[in-house]
Image: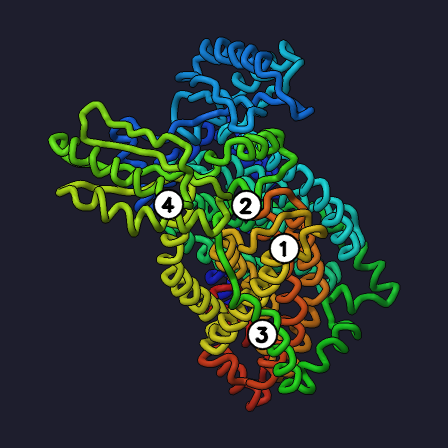
Amino acid sequence: MDVGKGMETVEKRSVIVRVASWSAAHPWRAIVGWFVFVALCLGASAAVGTNSATTADYRVGKAGKAEAIATEGGLQRRPVEQIVIDSPSGTLDVSAARAAAADITARMGKLPEVDNVEQPVLSRDGKVLMVQVVMTGEELAARKKVDPLVEQTAAVQQAHPGVRVQETGGPSMSKGLDKQRGDDLAFSEMLTLPVTIITLMIAFGSVVAAGVPVLLALTSIAAAMGLSAVASHVLPDAGVGNNIILLIGLAVGVDYSLFYLKRDREERAKAGGRLGSQAVAEIAAATAGRAIVVSGFAVIVSTATLYFATDVIFSSLATGAVIVVTVAVASSLTVLPALLAKLGARAERRAARLAARGKAARAHGGTSKVWSALLRPATQRPGVTLLVSVLVMLGLAAPALGLKLSVLGKDTFSRDIPAVQTYDRLTAAFPETLVQHQVVVRADANREPQVRTAMEDLRRRAQADPLFDKDVEFKLSTSADKRITSMMLSVPVKPSSPQALESLDHIRDDYLPATVGKVSGAEAYVTGDIARDVDYLDHQSSKLPLIVAILLLVTFGMTVLAFRSVVIGVIGTLLNLLSAASAFGLLVVVFQGHWAEGILDFHSTGAIGSRVPLFLFVILFGLSMDYQVFVVSRIREAAQRGLDTRSAVLEGIGSSAGVVTSAAVVMVTVFASFAFLTLVEMKQMGFVLAAAVLLDAFIVRIMILPSVLTLLGKVIWWPSRTMRAVRQQQQLGAVGSETVTVLWTRESGSV
């Protein structure tokens, strides 16, 4: 290549290449700079704290309107703790229980976190005495203030050993869930880190090389957690961000480093010591680095579609995923070339030893005999392989047609949490506390008598309905300005039962229109756990078509932009859909039935968590782009060198097979560990992600993708100008590396 062409290539170096080049040339500056960045992120988090979502942030639909109106009148649901006093033997000493209740009342009344303590209530069977403690502030914030109440309950238990005194309620159960979530994350780290390191050691045969991806992933996760705390002051944190940062961060962080490290070692082996670390870094950045940016950007853009759900939980999930993927990409392009430059001499010495043992082909990323054999059906009999593989995937996807969604609530909480165990005893003794609907009405103050009369009529209708509890007094409450009226209706059934939904329908569709609906100018809504869940599902269902449409469009556009091929864009989108559908089919088979409860330690409600499908659909599309980008990039490189489609597929998939398989093992390990956590939604997410990666890495990548590419031949690159130019050069018999380099530079902006 002459000087003019060399200058042209240098001038056209992409930002990715320039950053990697600088990092390799100034390794210590890059390494120190990275750790300073991580420290600053953590410092910023400690300085500003996390802005948690409030109750108002969760308001959706008609239930949300009811809550807003109730809050306006000071009639909103308050955070409540129940102190349950009973006897383990079953026979309650009522006098001893009342003495303990008096002690509880006196102690709780002195706490600043307590608004008031209600009179003790004895259960109908006389076996349980309940003291209800109303806390100050809003529902969600109460879990941060519940510890003093729990301490006083423990003190009363110690002072009254003749009875059992335990506490439950929304705040204490939330506190228990938070602790359990933290324990789960620690367990996940303990399980995944050793497996990840062992997998990387097998892939690279070096403890140091295995440690680099893990180090970058962990520091990326730390930085992302710090940044997410800062971001929460713009988009409130729903308490799930760190779970997703760990789940996604360890998987993609290791993967991106793995792909870059593999390419760096290949180029060093090819150069045989003739190129310095800076030159090797530029070559790796122009290939693997570019693929990492495309893949990471695809995950970021795909995940960002969750913001269209206009839901605080999905926004929190999206923010965590976007931040950790961005940081993981940045670490792979900045500090990783510096680390590899420092480790370059070690890698070159190892490459020399491998070459001396006759293993140079592997170091160069060639196709092994094993992978050649695995790819043989797809490249020699593509039609049959494609048909059989697609039928298998469609068979796995078929159960997804029976997908049922529900908001997973108290019925699915782990019974290992003490507050949940107490809740079970409470609801058994006081079944009217299981489901409560709050009817809220707003009207002009002069219509308060009419509203009250209508609400009395509604109460009579409810008490005549066998679904509602007849023995509980349905009290009316009115705001000070007489504009807002509220009433609680109790239903003694489990929240997950069909009767709970039926009772809500009776109120909304029958009783309200026939009573309050006849009062001129009155607004009437229903809230409560069941109403919230129903409205949340309706809200999510209304947003689903928009998000799926945007996601499909984004995925297609990203693929076309990355490979300059409409055909590859269509193939990628369809394969992502097939992979996601198959994973959802497995999700339904495992979690909607009861056969796997003992294996995965969960209680099936016959439904999937309402947030699981949408979140996973988005994440799966993003992660599927990982394999697609890295594998198709290798195939494209081979095709740009003039190989026919079949040979390019064999070389591209075969040369990347080892590292992609290692990456898949890491991802599956990370995701599968979440399937053994306690929270059911996390189990479902972890299981589906692990299943999807396995299907994508081994069936889609080895069978379906190469079959499709082989069948379509040169058509797959339409309408890429580079590939047309390569074919023209093939016809002239003059394809050279310099020609391909310049063509690739002009089209993709890479060296």
Q: Mark 1 and 4 residues: CB-CB less than 8 Å, in contact?
A: no
Q: Amino acid at mark 4?
A: Asp
* Mark identifier at residue 687: 1
Q: Earlier in the sequence, mark 1 or mark 4?
A: 4
**Structural distance between the alpha carbons of marks 1 and 4:** 42 Å
Q: Which residue is mark 2?
A: 244
Closer to the camera, 370 or 288?
370
Query: Label 1's element?
Result: helix
Residue 494 left/right relative to 88: left
Tell me how far mark 1 sits from mark 2, CA to CA. Answer: 14 Å
Query: In the picture, which quadrant includes the N terminus?
Result: bottom right
Q: Mark 2 belongs to which amino acid?
A: Ile
* Mark 3: amino acid: Leu
Query: Could you say whether the residue bearing mark 3 is in a helix, strand or loop?
Result: helix
Residue tagged 4 = 465
Identify which residue is drawn at 43% across, 31% down: 140
Badge 3 is on which residue?
394
